[in-house]
Image: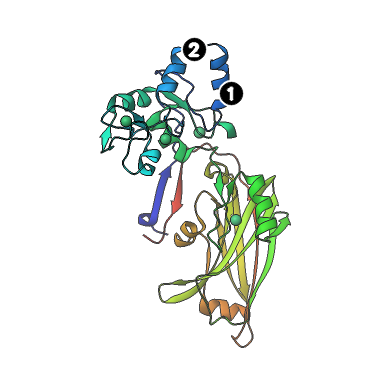
Amino acid sequence: MDLDSVECVSSYDGLEEETSHLHLPFSKSHGGAAIDAAAQAQGISPATSIHELLECPVCTNSMYPPIHQCPNGHTLCLTCKTRVQNRCPTCRQELGDIRCLALEKVAESLELPCKFSSLGCPGIFLYYSKLKHESLCNFRPYNCPYAGSDCSVMGDIPFLVDHLRDDHKVDMHTGCTFNHRYVKSNPREVENATWMLTVFHCFGQYFCLHFEAFQLGMAPVYMAFLRFMGDESEARNYSYSLEVGGNGRKLIWEGTPRSIRDSHRKVRDSHDGLIIQRNMALFFSGGDRKELKLRVTGRIWKEQQNSESGMCIPNLNT
Ligand SMILES: [Zn+2]
Ligand SMILES: [Zn+2]
Ligand SMILES: [Zn+2]
Ligand SMILES: [Zn+2]
């Protein structure tokens, strides 16, 4: 691999944001209920009144920029604005497109808990930092790692493991070695949709072993790679190897599992795994080249803890 093809990505820690602003309970949807109740128990406080000021009078959710108002000054949130067909729900006046900049400034100046606070995130942020943080928050749920469909299920790792087993009927294995046979009776039909997933449970963690056929340029290839069910910072603590061969030849891949935060397609398209050319795959299969019979073996191991803050992800495609 040459140096031009290596993309270095530093990890971003969004938790170190501004800390010197108003600190008010604000979120209604996640984790705010208990704080709200506490504030109410103490009677009306300035916090409560600002909170009420920023409550959309139509849907009662908290309003964030852009906040709209009618010519008479009735405010409403963006979601409601798109629903009310240009009539103010309060006074029936035509709405137009008037922003309430003063209220937006108030909303922006508040410190708000991360919307994943109920999942354990302790972060408190100004509005725009909060949006930025939430897109990277370590407590945000993971997408389902199953590659074969556009599954929209999200959740934490234990939830997704159950989901893979129960809903996608994925094979579950305990242990850190694999010895898998992939057989396909008609290897001429290589579509992008040919894939397999097996989940491995070892070191108290879960790993997804993907095997699939796809078109690389004009040539169909087979690819196997491992993804870690957890965040990238933890994935770095593990390594894995894959071997495939036959007829006295062998291909070996050694790598670091990618986090399932990186989509299956992203990992595949960066070629971060064992890639077997069609001709070689048929050669490994032996016989009359009519059937694909690949035996992929490998193992996962834990690396010594390292303290590097950055990391490198090969991206051979660009
Ligand atoms: Zn609303
Ligand atoms: Zn109005
Ligand atoms: Zn968070
Ligand atoms: Zn799913």
Relative to 172, 83 lies left or right: left
Ranked by sequence position, the earlier of labels 1 and 2 is 1
Residue 211 on image: x %, y %: 58, 66
Q: Residues within 10 Å of mark 1 (few under 14, many from 20)?
A: few
Residue at left 60%, top 86%?
A: 290
Residue 299 on image: x %, y %: 66, 57
Q: Residues within 10 Å of mark 2 (few under 14, many from 20)?
A: few
In the image, residue 191 above or below residue 13: below
Q: Nearer the viewer, mark 1 or mark 2?
A: 2
Element class at badge 2: loop
Where the C terminus falls, by quadrant? bottom left
Residue at left 58%, top 14%?
A: 41
Residue at left 34%, top 29%?
A: 75
Which residue is the extreme one toward the right? 174
Question: What residue is disc 2 on?
Answer: 44
Where the N terminus falls, by quadrant? bottom left
Residue 69 on image: x %, y %: 31, 31
Relative to 286, 274 lies left or right: left
In the image, residue 2 above or below residue 33: below
The answer to whether one can see residue 196 in this image is: yes
Element class at badge 1: helix
Q: Amino acid at mark 1?
A: Ala
**Quadrant where ligand 4 appears:** bottom right
Does the residue at mark 1 contact the one at mark 2 (Cβ under 8 Å)?
no
Question: What residue is disc 1 on?
Answer: 34
Give the quarter of the image for residue 281. Answer: bottom right
The answer to whether one can see residue 120 in this image is: no
In the image, residue 229 above or below residue 288: above
Give the quarter of the image for residue 270. Answer: bottom left
Q: Amino acid at mark 2?
A: Ile
